[in-house]
Structure formats: C-alpha cells, structure tokens
Amino acid sequence: MYPHERSLVKKMEGKSFALVGVNSDRDKIALKQAMHEEQITWRSFWNGGSTSGPISSAWKIQGWPTLYIIDHKGVIRHSFLGAPSPQVLDSAIEKLVEEAEKGV
Amino acid sequence: MSGSYCRCPSCNARLKLTGESPVGKRITCPQCHTPFRVPETEEVFEAELVQPAPPEPADGVEPERQPQGRKKQLRPKKSSSKALVLVSAAIGAVLLLGGGGWGIWMIVKNRSNSAANAKPGSANFNANNPAPVTGNPGNPDRTPPAPAFEIGSAAPEIEGEDIDGQRFKLSDYRGKVVLLDFWGHW
C-alpha cells in the first residue's frame, strides 16, 4: 500500500489534496524508523499507541486499514474497509479534487 | 331355445319334446327309431336381460355383450396400490434430501458470516495485502460492517499530535480533499 500512497502524494503535489494518516502502532520509535525506511512523508496523527486509541474509537474503526475521503468542504464522500484498488481510489480522489479546484 | 328335452336311451341323442306333460309318454327316437317311454325331462327357459351388470374397466367390454347367467367379478387393483406406495416413498425421499440440503447450506452460511464479522480493535487487515471491500465481487456472501459515519455527513474534527509530538487538526486541511488513512505498520 505504501508504494501507491507515495505515488499518490507525488502525483497530487501542488493540488488541492492532502494525505493524512492516523497511526495506531504501539512503539513510536520503531514507527519513526519504519517511516524513514518506507519514505512515509505524509503527516499522521498518533492514536495513543493502540488500536483502541481515542481517534480510532471516536471514528469506530473496525479494521485496518480504513480509508475515508473527505471533500474540500469537510464532508465525507467515500469510505473503504480495507484498501481499495488503486484505480478506484485515484478515480474518486481526482473527481473531488476537480470539484475543489472549480470551487463547486 | 326354451322347451322340454330328453335323451334317447339307445343312441343318447338329445331330443326336444313337444306338447304338454311328455313324461311317461311313448315316443320313437327320430334318429335310431327305437321306441321308448319319455324319462325325466330337462326344462330349459329363456332369460331376458333386464339390467346389465356394470362394465369391467380394464376389459372395455360393453354390458350388452356379456353372456347370460355369468357374473362378472371386479378384480381388486393390486397393481395400483403398489404404485401408490412407490410414489409416496419417492416423494418422501425427495423432501428428506431437500430439507437436509437446505439445513446444511444454512449452517455453512452462518459459519461464514460469523467468521466475516470484524470485532472492534481486534481485526487486523494486513497492510501489505489488504482486502478491498468496495467494488470487490470476490466474496458476495461477506457483509462488511458499515462505517461509523455515513457518506454525506460532516467529518468530525480531529485534534491531536503527530509522530513528532506537534499538534494539528483535521480542519487545518479545509479547502483540500483529504484522504484520511487509518493505518498501522505491524
């Protein structure tokens, strides 16, 4: 999944798009190491070091990964339990970025 | 033909007698010409059909053609009762097999549904080999749990720290499309 996320961030650079993570790893130090190795450059919330952390609990996350696409007005437009195919994900994002840049 | 009949004691020919009370009278046999006195006679009467017997179904014979004096007995249909038993047994077997198969299918379906239910906090999809749910036709029987927030609803605010301890908010990104990714590196 990381390769696609990396390519997505690169592709959408300069556009009205942001990839924001919520990470539930236990060990922050190990996570930082992994992020450096995997070139995970996007920002992530720290979920308190647990899958039962405050953010995932508030969002009632039932499995990892879970993805939400939120439009430029803050409205949830898509959700995925498990990673969708890159084509599905990219297509959904591109349409919403178009909306954002048109100011719809 | 109705009438009185006797037999010649000499040549045994069957003779029809005319007249009344022929018993004891002297006659001559028309065949062997032996004279003799008439012994006991055989009285034959004609019978007229008043009500025909019900026709036998298998034979298809019309009642008017039945010979006189003969009774037609209805034979019991042993073959039809045997066929009925066989048909009933066949229907019973089909119902039993169908019911058993449906029961097994329901058990298998319930097991696969319970296996597919993810418990909060404990279900871990492998980040490297994720199971896409949206648009995946591979598992039609799996009913994925619904997300907490409906499509079209406002995303709740998130306030927290990043991995370096810096505070930030989800609303900082208003005006941009956000892909919010709940992930782990386990």
Image: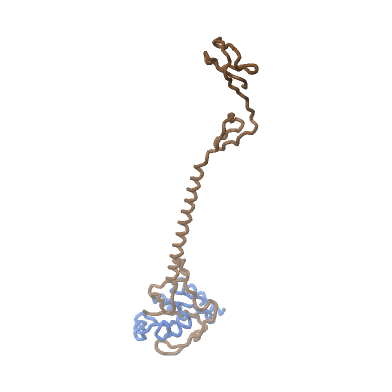
Residue at the extreme bottom of the image, as rendered: B166
Q: Nearer the viewer, residue A89 or B9?
A: B9
Chain shaded blue: A
Of residues B146 and B178, the one nearer the viewer is B146
| Among the 4 quarters of the image, the one containing residue A51 | bottom left
Residue B107 coordinates in the image, percent (x, y): 44, 65
Q: Is residue B48 above or below residue B94?
A: above
- The shade of chain B is brown
Q: Position of residue B86 (x, y in %)?
A: 47, 48
Give the residue at x 46% y 81%: A18
Q: Residue furthest front?
A: B24
Which x, y percent locates residue A47?
A: 42, 85
Quadrant for residue B4, please give it: top right
Q: Is residue B43 visible?
A: yes
Q: Is residue A39 above or below residue B139?
A: below
Residue A93 in view here:
no
Quadrant (top left/top right/bottom left/bottom right) for the N terminus of chain B: top right
Question: Is B25 on the left-hand or right-hand side of A8?
Answer: right
Q: Quadrant of residue B2?
A: top right
